Image (cartoon, grey):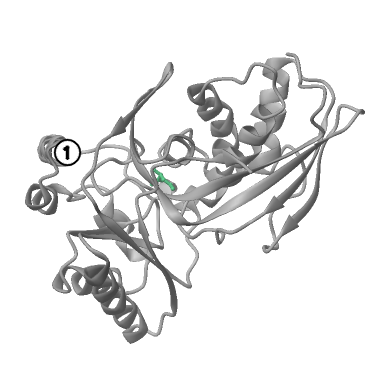
């Protein structure tokens, strides 16, 4: 694969994301406007992929085959036969284990930066595939519901990961309220507690809610969205991982949220509001409910971000 001769360094930004959206475990997600990760790649000549620095967070692996960003770059270089090697600097804007797609954002920023070196850049679908290698070592599963919205922006539905097929869904004007309690949930363990089977009755009900949610997004029907964004399968199994989960969810709904659900595997909770004023009310109610359980939290209010990761 040919690299542009005149480029020595590329930095890319990748936004935080919220996965599952209640009804679409492992297949739906959205991009947020609030925060994100940055990765800078600098060309080397020795063929090595080296993480030089990770800013803002401690405890992330520096070994190239253990870190989501460097592992994704390693796989992309192998696949495209890129031999020069790269030094990396990772600037983390997303807290670890927050349920806001931190591992996906680092991997995405890294592959988007690498794409910036290529004379003929690869497609977004291909970038999802490369970034997924990183996601796999972080969470133990090749789910693209953070990586896809992180690259494509908006709300995405992943119809298939092999071959990769991502569908951008339309959506009404919505404000996302993300409340991040100061708790950590590791995606790997939050996946580990899930039952491997689903009852037929639940499957039928959940399929109906997923289909209705997609209809509501296409028709911009807020009341249908309110009725249908229900998670009957995953939420009951994971709620115990988040102190006060059902109280915070009730507080959000009582304050007028369209829906409130785990953001990815948690512990963050995603709520939807139709306008900024309502989003503020919902946010305050959720923070108060966490505080009543002696849990501090950070919050973001963000429209859905129509743009995915980009080169700075
Ligand atoms: N779909 C994944 C899960 C998202 O819920 O395990 C993790 O961010």
Q: Among all residues in the image, which is located at the extreme front?
A: 6
Screen quadrant of the N terminus: top right
Vertical placement of 181 versus 73: above or below?
Answer: below
Residue 18 left/right relative to 150: left
Vertical placement of 241 versus 13: above or below?
Answer: below
Pinpoint residue 31: horizontal percent, then vertical percent. Answer: 41, 46
Q: Work out whether residue 169 or residue 244 is closer to the camera in this orientation and state it.
A: 169
Vertical placement of 264 versus 282: above or below?
Answer: above
Picture quarter with ligand 1? top left
Pinpoint residue 287: horizontal percent, then vertical percent. Answer: 34, 78
Residue 43 left/right relative to 17: right
Q: Work out whether residue 188 or residue 46 is closer to the camera in this orientation and state it.
A: 46
Q: Is mark 1 within 8 Å of ligand 1?
A: no
Residue 160 left/right relative to 171: right
Q: Residues within 10 Å of mark 1 (few under 14, many from 20)?
A: few
Count of marks, rendered view: 1
Residue at numbered disc 1: 199
Determine whether the residue tagged by mark 1 lies in a helix, strand or loop: loop
Q: Which residue is rendered at x = 48% and y = 38% of the image? A: 147
Q: Which residue is rendered at x = 68% and y = 35% of the image? A: 71
Q: Where, by quadrant of the figure, is residue 294 drawn?
A: bottom left
Q: Among all residues in the image, which is located at the extreme right?
A: 46
Screen quadrant of the C terminus: top right
Pinpoint residue 170: horizontal percent, then vertical percent. Answer: 25, 37
Q: Which residue is rendered at x = 92% and y = 28% of the image? A: 46
Residue 146 left/right relative to 103: left
């Amino acid at each position: 694969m040919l690299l542009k001769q005149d480029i020595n360094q590329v930095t890319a930004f990748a936004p935080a994301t919220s996965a599952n959206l209640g009804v679409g475990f492992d297949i739906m997600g959205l991009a947020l406007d609030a925060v994100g990760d940055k990765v800078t790649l600098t060309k080397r000549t020795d063929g090595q992929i080296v993480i030089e620095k990770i800013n803002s967070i401690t405890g992330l692996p520096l070994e190239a085959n253990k870190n989501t960003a460097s592992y994704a770059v390693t796989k992309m270089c192998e696949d495209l036969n890129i031999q020069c090697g790269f030094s990396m600097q990772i600037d983390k804007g997303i807290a670890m284990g927050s349920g806001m797609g931190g591992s996906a954002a680092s991997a995405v920023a890294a592959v988007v930066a690498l794409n910036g070196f290529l004379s003929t850049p690869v497609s977004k679908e291909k970038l999802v595939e490369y970034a997924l290698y990183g996601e796999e070592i972080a969470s133990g599963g090749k789910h693209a519901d953070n990586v896809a919205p992180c690259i494509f922006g908006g709300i995405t539905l992943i119809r298939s990961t092999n071959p990769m097929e991502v569908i951008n869904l339309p959506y009404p004007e919505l404000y996302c309220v993300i409340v991040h309690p100061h708790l950590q949930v590791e995606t790997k363990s939050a996946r580990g507690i899930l039952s491997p089977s689903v009852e037929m009755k639940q499957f039928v009900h959940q399929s109906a809610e997923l289909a209705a949610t997609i209809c509501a997004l296409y028709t911009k029907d807020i009341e249908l969205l309110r009725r249908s964004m229900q998670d009957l399968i995953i939420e009951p199994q994971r709620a115990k991982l988040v102190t006060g989960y059902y109280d915070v969810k009730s507080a959000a709904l009582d304050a007028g949220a369209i829906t409130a659900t785990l953001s990815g595997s948690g512990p963050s909770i995603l709520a939807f509001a139709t306008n900024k004023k309502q989003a503020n009310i919902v946010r305050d109610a959720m923070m108060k409910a966490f505080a009543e359980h002696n849990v501090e939290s950070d919050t973001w209010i963000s429209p859905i971000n129509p743009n995915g990761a980009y080169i700075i």
